[in-house]
Image (cartoon, coloured by chain):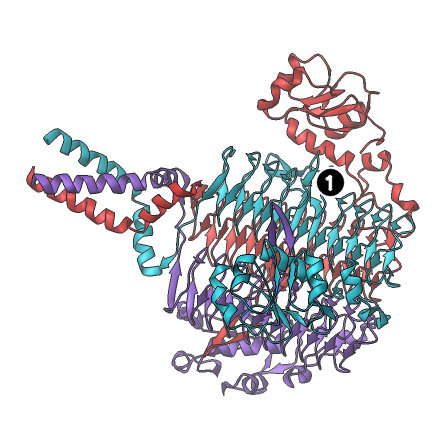
Chain colours: A purple, B cyan, C red
Amino acid sequence: MTGHGLTLGEIARHIGAELRGDAALPIARLNTLKDAEPGDLAFLANPAYREQLAVTRAAAVILSAGDAEGFPGAALIATDPYVAYARATALFAEVQFADVQFADSQFADSQSADARLAGSPGAPAGVHPSAVIDPAARVDASAAIGPLAVVGPGAVVGAGTRVGAGTVVGANARIGARCRIAANVTIYHRVCVGDDVVIHAGAVLGADGFGFANDRGRWVKIHQLGTVIIGDRVEIGACTTIDRGALGDTVIEAGVILDNHVQIAHNVRIGENTAMAAYAAVAGSTTIGKNCIFAGQSGAVGHVTICDNVVALARCTLSKDITRPGSYSADLLMEETPKWRRNAARFRQLDDMAKRLRKLEGKFERES
Amino acid sequence: MTGHGLTLGEIARHIGAELRGDAALPIARLNTLKDAEPGDLAFLANPAYREQLAVTRAAAVILSAGDAEGFPGAALIATDPYVAYARATALFAEVQFADVQFADSQFADSQSADARLAGSPGAPAGVHPSAVIDPAARVDASAAIGPLAVVGPGAVVGAGTRVGAGTVVGANARIGARCRIAANVTIYHRVCVGDDVVIHAGAVLGADGFGFANDRGRWVKIHQLGTVIIGDRVEIGACTTIDRGALGDTVIEAGVILDNHVQIAHNVRIGENTAMAAYAAVAGSTTIGKNCIFAGQSGAVGHVTICDNVVALARCTLSKDITRPGSYSADLLMEETPKWRRNAARFRQLDDMAKRLRKLEGKFERES
Amino acid sequence: MTGHGLTLGEIARHIGAELRGDAALPIARLNTLKDAEPGDLAFLANPAYREQLAVTRAAAVILSAGDAEGFPGAALIATDPYVAYARATALFAEVQFADVQFADSQFADSQSADARLAGSPGAPAGVHPSAVIDPAARVDASAAIGPLAVVGPGAVVGAGTRVGAGTVVGANARIGARCRIAANVTIYHRVCVGDDVVIHAGAVLGADGFGFANDRGRWVKIHQLGTVIIGDRVEIGACTTIDRGALGDTVIEAGVILDNHVQIAHNVRIGENTAMAAYAAVAGSTTIGKNCIFAGQSGAVGHVTICDNVVALARCTLSKDITRPGSYSADLLMEETPKWRRNAARFRQLDDMAKRLRKLEGKFERES
């Protein structure tokens, strides 16, 4: 992560921060306040780390105007230092040659700081000779298709999009512009992906929803005739699955971020900018609002509607329609096992305890 | 999904429904009562939607004899309309060219309605030139092997089976007839797959079971010498894993349906027609009966036996042998977080509360 | 699993057991006491199976000195019979041609018993002609690269390591010696893997950690600039994901074993010899100690430290720093649904019940 050739002034301009100090100061890499070495750019977003400001070895720090007051060093002053740091990471990101990598490795070092500052997606364009592109597919000349990737008939790959090694894009699928699709991703036929979408390895878009009719004990498959629609700026984690719709489509709206191992069932709709952590699961035909947050292993049952701005904490299943924004829970806090077992055993007596309590109250009232 | 060229009469014959109306009526696609447009075939299976029958724009409806009585339109009358609808979806299903797709795309449109009505698996036969087929493998002439798929030495691929792009079939694995194996599936050596099996992208069959002996702190691997046996008509979801047995085999019996992200550990046996939703997990050496239903994130511990017709509701771990059919639960209903926290905090006092309740009862009895 | 051509004496030497009986006794395969046929080698590790010793048909048994006393048959006497059995399985393991398989199938039978006894990794060395190896990659001459695998520029593959079909090794990744990497694995750029590591199909190492800053409702991606470091002798299950660090690295120390579908978030550190069962999940920046055991669907929240020798039972989330070794729980035992529902309904009254109990205690005290 060294040798990117960026200066503090270039970074300030890119992230929209106010520069305090020498614009020509070379920055080797990003780091935390605690671990920063001379030449590094650090950031202060969480007040809990404020005391590290006094002792950091960083060449410069991204921070708020308030925190900058007492800080004598070079600074990039931002309204939201965490967002500013996030924007800065884009300047230090590598082209992920795990995803797209070329036998002619002279391309490997071609992503200059200039290209990154210009917002270039960074990888050299072109189709690796080992990729299998159907003659009836349309791959934009500025797209990059990695080794041993497959693009099916009728599929479209947009400008600047990178498709990783071993990834399969099915027939008549449409991938927008500037997407970064990692290695070994599977995109089934007719799936539509917007612009600026990131999809990680092992993700599966458009497999059949889990639909079966039971015919006197035997399951009869309901072929899934819909597809999956992914909006712009969506991020999809590794091994995450989004099933195609049964008749209509499964829809992930713009700006949604999904962590690894997330499961989105058929005919679900996820509203804009909703975030879901690992193993979050939404059952079929449920609609999730905008700006919701699903913690790890949370989820929602099928055929319900969740309004905007709902937070489902860890392991909480939203089990009915939710019309009031707010936080919902269903998980118990851990305890050491011996203590836990004593309480858990009582849980099995809880209904009995409630009845006995009521009876005792009744007796007490009668006697008083 | 248009232009399939099917008529109402053809559909009636295929799904075994009684035709009421014009057999020559062309049907464009399947749809819900609510969303149907003229030319669509809809279905009424759930009584909750009965009132939509009066206002649907569908050209015809699949429904029961009872519901057909008051309905003046064209109808396909079936004993079980949901099963009839399921059978109809097969006529409208596309060949999934995400799975098997050919550089010579003239084949892409070759699945005629006639072929579908004849029950043809639909994809053109043949081995894509980019696939790697070991000379010692046997691929039936009517099978279709997608681009960049691998079939190992000694492996057998049966008649009419389609193997998707990037899928790896290990040495000496045996795949039956008419299977549909999607892209980027991994089938390890010696795994046996029956006939008419569907396997979705990212699924892994035959990875090592999680077996280790602990040698004074260090884990010593127990090599997994068994394999995986998959019965006929099984469906396996995306990113689902079925581990090979340690000494004996892991067995999935005929007609089992597994959703995405399911985990079946080594030496498990799953009985016929059992269904498991996403993230269901069965630990090692457990036997599950026939016709069981496992909801999302449910499961069973290792080394137990679950009888037929058991239902495990969401997040319920079956923790001991079950000999009585029925429904089992272990999950609490969500609440808004502030209210939840008050109750959850009391959970940690539950044993104490039970003792205090008993004590109060004792005092009351003594005083009365 | 027959015809391995091993004798009881060879096995005794390999596993370090004391031989009692004929060293030249041919052993066909390993089996359980119960299922063993003549010619099989069985083992007795769990006292619960001791009575099977009297009736087993096995040619010989691995057992402890104590159990050997009353046993008249051929025996391999070991201090820890389970560990001895584990070591024996290595002699009966096949080369997994699902992972690395060669078009020239004459190699398929080349792993002789001699080779296995010599500890040879077993697969023939070489690069399959269909694999795509970047000219700037370095693959050891004794490594084996399967069909349609990809090794990126700057990547290193060590001596004796096998890379399965369809697996992608990213730019500048480093794989140590004697690793066994199955099919369709994705290893992102710059990930470092130690020696003797086993990685199963569908695993993803080095995808982006789930890091975003929220800019007035929109998520801004924090590019993940660190990588993943995997120690020696680690085993990683199918569809398991280990995310790359945001600034620093995600570290899995030597001897860790991870089952299928495990999720390790960015900047996590897992201590030596810790074991995690399926769906175990560790959130970002958490440090787990050595020799911990995580049961299925257990996990830890982010930014906490868990000491050595902690056991998290099934579905238990470790929700704060743990400084005391021991077992922790958070899961309730299943019950039949009608009974469960009565108790679960009372859970929602628990705070109320606690208050009423307190009130009753107060009244009783005042009246007494």
In this orientation, which residue lies closer to the viewer: A250 or A185? A250
Using the rendered view, name the quadrant where residue B247 is placed. top right
Using the rendered view, name the quadrant where residue A164 is placed. bottom right
Query: Percent x, y for residue C352?
Result: 24, 51
Q: Residue at x 18, y 36 (%)?
A: B360
**In the rendered image, which quarter contains the C terminus of chain A?**
top left
* Residue C310 can be seen in this image: no
Work out whether B80 lies above or below B324.
Answer: below
Query: Percent x, y for residue B216?
Result: 60, 34
Query: Percent x, y for residue C159?
Result: 80, 51
Kind of element beneath mark 1: loop
**In the rendered image, which quarter contains the N terminus of chain A?**
bottom right
Using the rendered view, name the quadrant where residue B203 is placed. bottom right
Q: Residue at x 63, y 77 (%)?
A: A194
In this orientation, which residue lies closer to the viewer: C184 or C193? C184
Q: Residue at x 50, y 51 (%)?
A: C299
Query: Percent x, y for residue C41?
Result: 74, 25
Q: Which residue position is annotated with label 1? A: B227
Work out whether A341 lies above or below B180.
Answer: above
Q: Residue at x 54, y 85 (%)?
A: A12
Work out whether A6 lies above or below C51.
Answer: below
